[in-house]
Image (cartoon, rainbow, N blue to C red):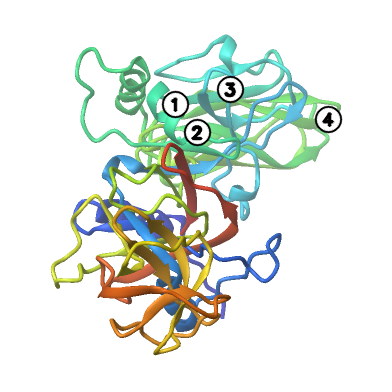
Amino acid sequence: MSAIITSEFRLNTTSVFVDALGTDSYYMGLGRPNNWTDELNPDVPYENVYTTNTVWENMYAMKKLDSTDITYTCPRNVWVSGQTYSEYDDRDSNLEGKQYYVISDNNNVYLCLKSGGVSTKDPDIEGVTTSGVIDYTNADGYIWKYLFTVPVDTGTKFLTASFIPVVHLDTQPTPGSDTALLNQWAVQQNTVDGAIYNVKIDNAGTGYTSAPTVTIEGDGTNATATATVSGGVITDIEVTNIGSGYTKAIVTLSGGGGSNGSVRAVIGPKGGFGADPRVDLRTHYVIINKVFNGNEAGTIPSANDFRQITLVKNPIEDGGSPAAANAYTVAHSLEVSLGSTFDPDDVIEGTVTGAKGFVVEYDSVNGIIKYVQNEDTGYTPFTTSDLIRLETASTGGETCTAVVDPEVQHYSGDVVFVENRTAVTRASDQIETIRLVIEF
């Protein structure tokens, strides 16, 4: 038995996740302030309960994702003169593994409808073409379809060295919108459903003394093409009218004095090329961009580094309400008397219970220690009977006046993404922009 998951299913699954930001609450969490066993090689997260539980143990802050923090994306292929690109083929079993679309230096995205070998003529020479195609068959043999231009603000937030942000416009942009959006809307409105832009040669045949007649039959109308012959074989099929409405087509050759020539039509996606660039470019990826600005106006720790990034769906506040605030401290807290100094990553200990924890941050003005507990420290809870001091100290300590639960209930909601990485340093006057790419 053999089976596949189609690109449509993967795109639909991606869409469900993107759309969920409008109905569910997703938070990006920061955690793991203490070192990995090998700091240059972070632990590998696995898809199991153990990983999910340790995520909560190590997390010390989270911030809510907004709908503007996420978009569809696809791998980035840059147009370079001298490169050979693949042409779109509706029967290609590995289309995603090929460079069949490109992004130019002007952030224009083009789909390759026909390849002529080495590409030497920049599609940006013609540039934004909101209807029809860019036909370079008389130059380097390529035919390109302009899809869209990445808008400036979208590019600033989401465009990376490896991925291109992709959007589909559901409504017409208002007058005065970014020209890129107006152009994309024009492309979407001018698409031709079921057009045939390319006829591929499966077998060049033999013995042709003249060009055979090309006939296209199917459930669409008006598609026509002509053949070129050289040295007794078919060397090219030029589509002279793209037609419309085809979901299936049979292309036959007649005459010309030869035999065994075989060609077939390439039919585009539903709606036509450009109707939905997410379909054209197989965008079953999303890119998330979240900015953490210092301590977020005093709501999260900023003195320690992090080595783990997570996404949590629908966490619950300590009081039992669904999380809704912009940011939360997820670390445990101790309120202590003043006098001692506790630095980030110090291990503190309770003199009575023997409880231990890693210091995330210490507020020396108000006497508040933010800390996490994991397998390295054990999970014994601190109590107000404890004096709190460094694990390395044998005397002294500060009186614990209160043990405060995290602002969000640990193990609430669903952990849907985990990434372990090398340490990222934080500071109260520092901004971290975190980009995540998730494949569905």
- The image position of residue 419, as x and y in percent, is 52, 61
Please tell me in which quadrant of the rendered image residue 160 appears.
top right
Of label 3 and label 1, which has the lower sequence position? 3
Helix, strand or loop under label 4:
loop
What's the CA distance linking mark 1 and mark 2?
A: 8 Å
Mark 1 and mark 3 in contact (Cβ < 8 Å)?
no
**Disc 4 residue type?**
Gly
Residue occupied by mark 1? 150
Label 2 – label 4 distance at C-alpha: 48 Å
- Asked if labels 2 and 1 touch by Cβ distance under 8 angstroms, the answer is yes
Residue 239 in view (yes/no): no
Give the mark nearer the N terminus: 4 vs 3. Answer: 3
Q: Residue at the spot x=34%, y=62% of the render?
A: 338
Quadrant placement of the N terminus: bottom right
Vertical relation: 132 (above or below) 369: above
Mark nearer the viewer, 1 or 4: 1
Which residue is disc 4 drawn over? 232
Say which residue label 2 marks.
159
Instruction: Give the number of the disc on residue 104.
Output: 3
Question: Comparing marks 2 and 3, which lies closer to the viewer?
Answer: 2
Vertical placement of residue 211 versus 351, above or below: above
- Residue at image position (59%, 19%) is 105
Please identify the residue farthest to the right as the structure is shown: 231
